[in-house]
Amino acid sequence: MSIKSRQVAGVTSLVVVIVAALSAYHLATLARLSLQESASRGELLRQAIFQRARDVVPTTTDVASAYVALQKDGGIRSLLESAACCSENVTYAAIVDREGTAVAHSFPAYEHQRLAEQEDLQKIVDQDSIALLRNVYSDRTFEVRQPLLFGDQEFGSIRIGISTLLVKSQLQKAFKAAAQNVLIALLVSSFVAILLAQWMLRPIHVIQSGLSRLGRGELDVRLDLPEGDEFKGLGTSFEAVSAQLSASRAKALSTPTEFETVVENLEDAVALFNPDGDLIFCNPAMGSLLPGFSTGSRRLSEIAPEDNELRQLVERTLAAHRPQGPVSVSNDQGEERLLMTHPIDDADDKFVGAMLVARNLAYLNQVHSTLNYSRKLAALGRLMAGVAHEVKNPLNAMTIHLELLRQKLGKAQPVIVGAASPQADARGFRLQAEDSLPAQAGHQMAQGLMDNNVTKHVDIIGKEIQRLDQVVGGFLKFARPDELKLQPIHLTSIISDVTTTVAPEAEQMRISIKSECPRELPEINADPAMLGQAILNLALNGCQAMPNGGTLKLSCRSTSRNRVEVDVEDTGVGIPPEHLQKIFDLYFTTKEKGSGIGLSMVYRIVQLHDGEVEVQSTPGVGTRFRLIFPQA
């Protein structure tokens, strides 16, 4: 919903709710007043009957005669019969005995019959509005009661019946009137809300129009806002922003160095020409395609001969104001280029020149080949990870059964096996009669199983299985690393943690640690745990490369192209030139007890962070690893 629709709906709903609440309160008040009026009339009739009954009862000698006197008394009979005239809501009036049997009734046919006792009307009148309305619409009869005394004893009571049917009828008429009022309030409030929303939202429409003009490139936009303190400050702020954008745009147009820097780094060749055919700008890649560019000339007719396809494309675009190409050409080095031109229009759709683009097809083919190769490597990695995972299951089973074999060999005892009866062999199994061996042969078999060479061979198999399991585990860790949890981090904290971790080992090996990481260094998006592990691996490798002591230096710096560099440098033995191309290969190591996984994991972690790794090493001087990451 739009702001206008929400405002109209909100105002209308508020008015309708208020009117409906007031109408409900009015209906409840009306019902209460009607019942109170009926109760008052019933009270008058009750008092009149009570006074007459009090005059009649003392003339009797017992309760039975009192009932007869009340039934035959003409005054009481007249009062009972006039009950209907007392109020429209009074349905009956009666005098009943202690058992509830009617002694005298406004309708003689009900005399000598038991009357069901109804709820006291006064209790209903005293209830809250919701309970009161519920009882009114229940179509029940309520009573006004007065006890009768004979001496000090209660011998009966006066009952006046009050019906809510008439009250309900009155409420229904009032409800129709209230519904009409709600409908009228809904229509009036909707109309007023629409007018109010139109008036209140006008400044927003003005601001929206101003923003649209700014988006189209108009400068110094001003807002026609209503007078008042509320909008004066808003208009001033908007005009200040407009002026600032105008100044920024003028500055950007006057200093095209940033644009040139970006275009110069493009692999594609780009050149701009004005409508007169003068060269406005071209990057270095385009210079090799323009024969006369080195002479310093800027005229298209001077930097390219008439039969040059590049010149023909530009001239056709300048004449027709339409794109031309693509056309394939080759330069002096044999590089194939795809030429195309595009007309350039300003914000007012006015033609201001032509852009010439020469796309390097060799580079695109190289990128395409790299992508295909990357896909193949990824598929091969997934395949090898699955194979390694499947290899681990048999290795685990072999380890378990080898351990069981080792336990059985440890429990084995030399046993001489008879020829006629079953005996136990050296492995704990019993030989049946038909499989029994000569005693000397059984003795030799047991001795062979207990030979120390067997145990030695089992240990060798166990160690090889364990080594193979470690190799498979390392491959799995390399092929399927943990999920990255990237977040903006400052390298200062990472370098500090690595320095603290490496310090004890470095101190034992007489290695001094230096760290240079300025606090104002830009943040990078990285997984703190994985990045810390990569730098820690390099630092530990550096320490191991300095068995006779030295210096380990960890430094950080920001560079061009929004990059951050991390250097890990040691003064150790260095890496031979023939090994530099292999150090990141999985399982390649020159250490006696090395696994060949550490540097591979470093390279893998840097790749996952869209970074680069550089290494420089001189044997006998030291090694420097440089990690390069994009800024956050």
Image (tube, rainbow, N blue to C red):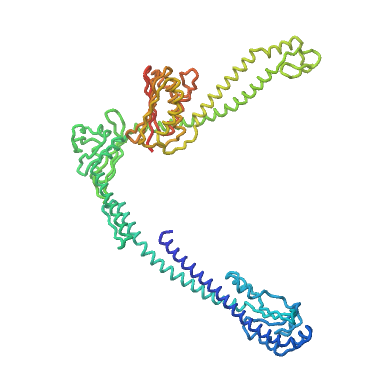
Q: Which part of the image, by quadrant, shows the N terminus?
A: bottom left
Q: Residue at x 53, y 74 (%)?
A: 26
Quadrant housing residue 73:
bottom right
457, above or below 520, in the image:
above
Q: Residue furthest top?
A: 440
203, above or below 492, in the image:
below
Q: Residue at x 20, y 36 (%)?
A: 306
From the viewer's perspective, tell me whether residue 242 is left or right of residue 428.
Answer: left
Q: How many badges with numbers are in the image?
A: 0
365, above or below 426, in the image:
below
Q: Which part of the image, by quadrant, shows the C terminus?
A: top left
Residue 217, visible in the rendered structure: yes
**Image position, residue 361 (x, y; %):** 34, 33
**Image position, residue 24 (x, y; %):** 53, 71
From the viewer's perspective, tell me whether residue 480 is left or right of residue 191.
Answer: right
Residue 603, visible in the rendered structure: no
Viewer-nearest residue: 391 or 249: 249
Viewer-nearest residue: 170 or 154: 154
Quadrant housing residue 121:
bottom right
Q: Residue furthest right?
A: 420
From the viewer's perspective, tell me whether residue 297 is left or right of residue 514.
Answer: left
Q: Residue furthest bottom?
A: 74
**Image position, residue 52 (x, y; %):** 69, 87
Quadrant housing residue 395:
top right
**Image position, residue 283 (x, y; %):** 26, 35
